Amino acid sequence: MKALTWHGKGDIRHETVDDPRIEEPDDIIIKVTACAICGSDLHLMDGCMPTMESGDVLGHETMGEVVETGSGHSKFKQGDKVVVPFNLACGQCFFCQKQLYSLCDRSNRNAEMAAKVMGQSPSGLFGYSHMLGGYSGGQADYLRVPYGSVGPIAVPQGMDDEEVLFLSDILPTGWMAAEHANIQPGDTVAIWGCGPVGQMAILSAWLQGAGRVIAIDQVPERLAMARDKGRAETIDFSETDVYDALMEMTGGRGPDSCIDCVGTEAAPDSGLMARVDRVKQALYLGTDRPDVLREIIMCCRKGGTLSIPGVYIGVVDKLPMGALMNKGLTLRTGQTHCQRYLPHLLNLIQEGQIDTTFLITHRADLSEGPELYKKFRDKDDGCIKVVLRPHG
């Protein structure tokens, strides 16, 4: 089959790889009908994530048609259309029983490797390094889905792929980000990053009761989308000091909640500390550029909440811990517990309360993936979200 594969920093290829096969009784194999490039995939392209190996199949935003099931699988049958969450969960361990699916104790086949870095291992992820399980991703013609009874959700008849594809990651990620922000009715929520997850966090913040949403970015197309589709007020950080703007907009108090949808690769030209972070990365003295993390700590009102769906890879420094502690801030983080949110979010889509299709700016064949990775990374040609069709 054909797939998008990783071969080192900046080297994404469309090439032939082995077809997946059933390995465990609860496996299913899907023929991929649609997949997407995620902002987290760019961290792989940029060489930020350790334990990638040449030839690894990428992708974790995937859906498709069931073509084969394991001997112990009974939930789906051939021909069913499903959306596959980006993380794998067994459904039975301590954490899965608490619906903390991204912390599953059993799904990471290389848990000891992850534990050496993190203390304990999170769940396995599709297409996201050997430290997180070494599972082949879904930017491919076909995908093996372990724990097929636990993760995937059936697509109701009559629904188009583009209506539901983002249930695989960015919609539940934006929803959990807003949930973690502890939004009370009428609250002011500030969201850093107007990429796909940021747009979903904007949408989710309104649905969860925000009275005001302020979005921060520097890319004109993303800011326009946040205003036009997300009904958010916007700040262009390349033109305005974010702290000063937020203080003025909130009467000196600061936002009630701040959401970091940027993560490890904050813009390297956004300030002195961001430039220092970039130098440290180049010299292998640091792994992340946490400039947004520093900024949300300083901007959030006293007693407010910080939510961090943006991916961080390793260690960060120069964090204003004194401000975090003395302002009494609450901080919530984590990979998304997708399986917990899928039924509710699917219902909201069916009811017309959520429409994510506005995000899609580029549609293409899988073979165009390498070039679109570059466009997405470089924010070229107005690229905000790419959907790929492996089978046309």
Image (cartoon, grey):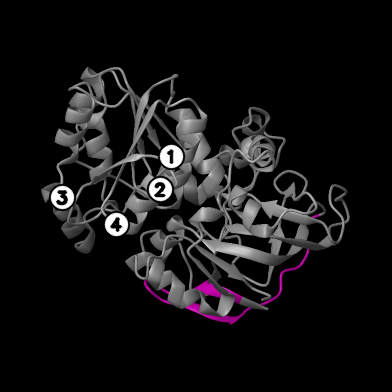
For residue 296, which quarter of the picture? top left
Residue 106 spot, x, y in % from top left: 64, 43
The crowding category of the residue bearing disc 1, from other C-alpha atoms within 10 Å (few below 14, some 14 to 19, many at least 20), is many
The crowding category of the residue bearing disc 3, from other C-alpha atoms within 10 Å (few below 14, some 14 to 19, many at least 20), is few
Q: Residue at x 78, y 49 (%)?
A: 156
Which of the two residues, 340 or 131, is positioned nearer the viewer here? Answer: 340
> Which residue is labeled 4 in the image?
219
Residue 335 can be seen, yes or no: no
Range of residues picked out in magenta: 3-24
> Which residue is labeled 3 in the image?
239
Q: Earlier in the sequence, mark 4 or mark 2?
A: 4
Residue 134 spot, x, y in % from top left: 57, 60
Q: Earlier in the sequence, mark 3 or mark 1?
A: 1
Task: Assign a secondary structure to mark 3.
Answer: loop
Q: Are marks 3 and 1 in contact (CB under 8 Å)?
A: no
> Which residue is labeled 2 in the image?
228
Q: Is residue 114 left or right of residue 274?
A: right
The crowding category of the residue bearing disc 4, from other C-alpha atoms within 10 Å (few below 14, some 14 to 19, many at least 20), is some
For residue 89, which quarter of the picture? top right
> Which residue is labeled 1 in the image?
202
Q: CA distance from mark 4 to mark 2?
A: 14 Å
Vertical order, 1 against 144 (above or below)? below
Q: Is residue 332 left or right of residue 153?
A: left
Looking at the rendered structure, the kind of residue marked 1 is: Ile
For residue 19, which quarter of the picture? bottom right
